[in-house]
Amino acid sequence: MNRIKKILILLFCVMFIASSVFATKHITVLGTSDMHGNIWGYSYEDNSETANNGMARLYTYIESVREENPNTVLIDAGDDIQGTIMTDDIYNKTPDEAHPVIEVMNYMGYDAMTLGNHEFNWGVDTARKILSQADFPILAANVIDADGNYATGRGYTIKDVDGVRIAIIGVVTPDVPIWDGGKQGIDELTYLPANVAVRNVIDEIGDDVDVITVSAHMGMYAEFDEDNGSDSAQKILDDNPEIDVLQVAHNHVVVNEKQGSTVIGGCRNGGRDVARFDLYLDDDNNVVDSTVEIIDMTGVTPSEEIRSIPLVKEAHERTISYVNGGGSGENGEGGVALGSTTERFQPENEIRGIPEGRVRDTAVMDLINMIQLEASGADVSAAALFKDTSDLPSGDINYGNIFDIYKFDNTLYRVKVTGKELKAYMEWSAECYNQWQPGDINISFDPEYPDYLYDLFEGVEYEIDLSQPKGSRIKNVMFNGAPLEDDDVLSLAVNNYRYSSALKAQGLVSGKRDWESSESIRDMIVDYFAENSPVAPVVTGNWKIVGVDLSEDDPRRAEIIELINEGYLDPPYAESYNLSDYDALIAEAKEAKANNN
């Protein structure tokens, strides 16, 4: 076996050297995605600079690559005009005005952008008005209008770089109607399976190009269509193996791999990363080698060129004013605080990195659910703690504080559910937890479940038994003082995203919504503070976690927690620390202390 291994290594080295020898051209493709309106590198809800993201940092890196290799192509895979207070609450509401994100993308010199699903959040007309400001093509090969044409005007573009013809094909997840169906123009479009749309383009362009690049606003694996893979980048590649570069997006996770001769890359959100694809070609423009690397923006200095663009400076200052003034003045600027609280709403975390808002009932979630119940008149409400650190401080409240506890521009739906359906929905939500094991000192969370997938419920009393496996955790559900029966019928308040992407897509609820709010849930919270301040934190205590014994009286637990909170042990978020590992944990902490000193 050793001899065979040596031969294989030798063959690999020979092939690598040979490819390098025959390569006469070098082209770099840089891919961004899911920038979600983060131009400056700034958290408006926290009123503070960030350290590792933003389009200004991306531009610094992009320019350095262009200096290194003039044969560089810049593409984006969507979800760019949504995601910050600047975009969602100011500029996307005035789509006829110059949009700062598109202004910056023009300045950065993008060669193409693929539609993301969040480009549709304000309807088709708004998206078209904003995206029409782009100096580069907006691609969506699988979105077709009523006349049979590409909805954005382009499904692909071809770039000539150093005599190499590069096709860039853009596709968005066809699940857009699941989230935004019913909004202006959404249902009038046809959303083809991504794999089929890419195949159609490749057949159309034939041998007219040397390099095929696909920019796909979707993850590698199906989000909803597991049977057919219409929303799967892997299915695109399976059906179109001639693709040279595959950019993926949407899931906000790093993807860095190579399948056959295809390099595949994906980035996190907010301008956190750049996917760098390097292609090496011979004199006949054949790709003889390729690599992919995901570049983290940590440590990259933001570009002052970007921050100095007049519209960017104006938008940045306008947003800060909007946040600090609550948007109560003329044009949403200036003014006074939105309201106030009597004290902080979220308790301190016992264990660093383990959010109390996910392990016990807290005032933040009870406030959101109470507002949803009042607005909808429903029996039961469900809402998510979108961010582990979401909190309301003591004292004056501004718009940034509201955005911090409710970051998405969701509207509220009301739908009839049976007791059986509600319990199934609650079980789905409780899958975010890991199962507790004897000796575990903390509750931990399945890292495959993003924060925003875990809902908490108000209007019923219930227990979550973490000694049980997924699907068997919801216990003792009570409604109006009596056990909730499977055939009971209730009305449920839930946001539009959860209704579409979970209740309907997962087949949890058969009924259809019978009411939709005219304003966003975030605006409901703003109105509540305007009418009821000062607002005191209220915890109803309607749910609790059971089936666990966290050994709270064991001094070893206290010692481990102290080491976590001091930074000598990592937070046990994705896997609980267990007392059976006590000696190893203490040794690990001692080593960390020694290295720190």
Image (spheres, rainbow, N blue to C red):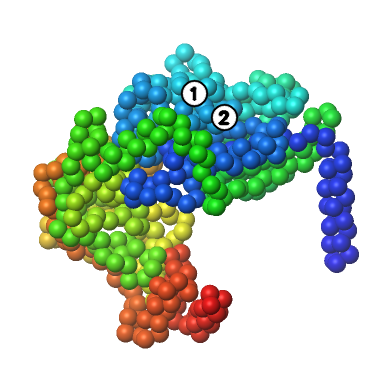
- Amino acid carrying label 1: it is Ala
Q: Residue at x 51, y 85 (%)?
A: 583
Secondary element at image label 2:
loop
Q: Find residue 207 and name its label.
A: none
Q: Quadrant of the N terminus?
A: bottom right
x%, y% of residue 307?
46, 37
From the viewer's perspective, is residue 32 above or below residue 462? Answer: above
Q: Judge from the rendering whether residue 79 lies leftward or rightward of residue 468; answer left or right.
A: right
| Mark 1 Cα-neighbour bin, 10 Å: few <14, some 14–19, many ≥20 | some
Residue 475 occupies quadrant: bottom left
Residue 440 occupies quadrant: bottom left
Q: Residue at x 52, y 22 (%)?
A: 135
Which residue matches tag 1? 134
Residue 372 occupies quadrant: top left
Residue sitting nearer the eye, 527 or 51: 51
- Amino acid carrying label 2: it is Tyr
x%, y% of residue 55?
49, 39
Which residue matches tag 2? 110
